[in-house]
Amino acid sequence: MSNEDEFFDAVTGLDSDESYEGVSEASFKDAQVFDSSSQKNNGSVPQENGIKKHRTSLPAPMFSRNTISVWSILKKCIGLELSKITMPIVFNEPLSFLQRITEYMEHTYLINRACSLSDSVERMQAVAAFAVSAVASQWDRTGKPFNPLLGETYELTREDQGFRLVSEQVSHHPPVSAFHAESLIGDFVFHGSIYPKLKFWGKSVEAEPKGTITLELLKHGEVYTWSNPYCCVHNIILGKLWIEQYGTVEIVNHSTGDKCVLTFKPCGMFGKELHKVEGYIQDKSKKKLCVIYGKWTECMWSVDPQAYEAHKKSEKKGDNKKQKNEEPNGAENDDADDMPEVQETVSVVPGSTLLWRIDSRPAHSAAMYNFTNFAMSLNELEPGMEAFLAPTDCRFRPDIRAMENGNMDEASKEKERLEEKQRAARKQRAKNDEEWSTRWFQMGTNPYTGSQEWIYSGGYFNRNYQDLPDIY
């Protein structure tokens, strides 16, 4: 097995890229939309009332991780960045990281809502809700997605949600995944490049967000940028795995100067803050316009700042009375970080407006890597799709396909074969003094942040897939 795989690149921040002059009309017309209505369903649900239905389960349930110990692998890595650590395949989930980042689009309706609103503050509220919803699929998702191979791609068109997306693994060391999503009717562009940076701290793995996400609302001429919160997976060695996200997320509207500052709270001593998100929207003069609050695992609300402060004072008085009659109940645990008891509901302030509520996961989600319905569909490969997809699309990865089908031995062998093939190709390029050339993204400048980032160069949906590398 290679020692060049990242351990846990499932969660990070994003970096912006895209054709910053806006998306041309031709950009939206170069797609050949795959129609599977004349094909066999291969386990998927057929079209209903003209809307394509996607599968809602995987071919096989997940493999048990209980028999595998990772201490022998990680005990020498405490405090180090996990950029060259190989993990047993049993700790993976059957998706590539390129598919995992596509899950940011699960709640695209929030972007569509922002596009439809005439008030800039309401648009910021919708964008803030989208930013929170984009990390909601990470709840209980403790499996590691497969590291994309250099040159690997993924595309997804969802007519029901009104977008299409293409992504490419543009660098292997350091690992960088670039993506570009756009509205099918020209309303928005959403893009970025992901630079994972992860560390192991003895009991946990922490993912540091690197880079900036960019969302362009083309109709309004507005551009928003932000970075994602930190994410920590607890009890890597022993105990029940659980996830928390924490840190400050600043969403900037570069057109109006408005800013939304969201704090993803760490769980705290007794877990009262677990999953909570709190923040506010302010104008360019720093006047608070509204408060945003909720949980990234549940819902987000908006309310007037004065109403929120009055509610908080009332809550605090009630907490003080309660604490006088209770004693702290907690003890040190050297073996595992016990997950705090989750307070399921958000205390809703009177007069609040609901911005977003998470969709329920399928009943069998726990047996299928805690996937959402959206995630269940991402690796779906129907008959006939081979004629339209790029040969580098990760739906064709044999290791991921084998794992999805429950064949762990074959998945492990294929993963090792692909890694060896990638190493051999790199050595051959070095021998020939050749540089790797990306196909769909090029390094350029984000005019809104001034940073150097991977920008979509266009043309993917023209379906000209000649001269693509043989990576599988």
Image (cartoon, rainbow, N blue to C red):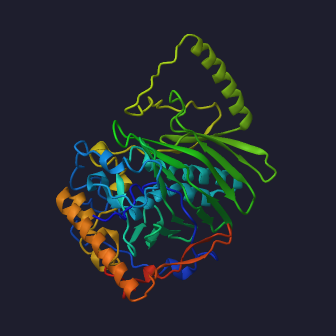
Residue 376 seen in the current view? yes
Q: Horizontal placement of 402 versus 469: left or right?
A: left
**Is 323 situated above or below 334?**
above
Taking the spot 67% from the left edge, 27% from the top edge, the residue there is 311
Taking the spot 36% from the left edge, 54% from the top edge, the residue there is 144
Q: Quadrant of the C terminus?
A: bottom left
Residue 21, image x, y percentages: 64, 77
Q: Horizontal placement of 379 versus 251: left or right?
A: left
Taking the spot 35% from the left edge, 80% from the top edge, the residue there is 427
Give the quarter of the image for residue 219. Answer: bottom right
Taking the spot 43% from the left edge, 60% from the top edge, the residue there is 83
Q: Quadrant of the N terminus?
A: bottom left
Give the quarter of the image for residue 317. Answer: top right
**Is 271 situated above or below 464?**
above
**Is 114 situated above or below 180?**
above
Residue 249, image x, y percentages: 62, 50
Residue 151, image x, y percentages: 40, 76
Viewer-side residue, 320 vs 387: 320
**Is 353 situated above or below 24?**
above
Give the quarter of the image for residue 288. Answer: top right
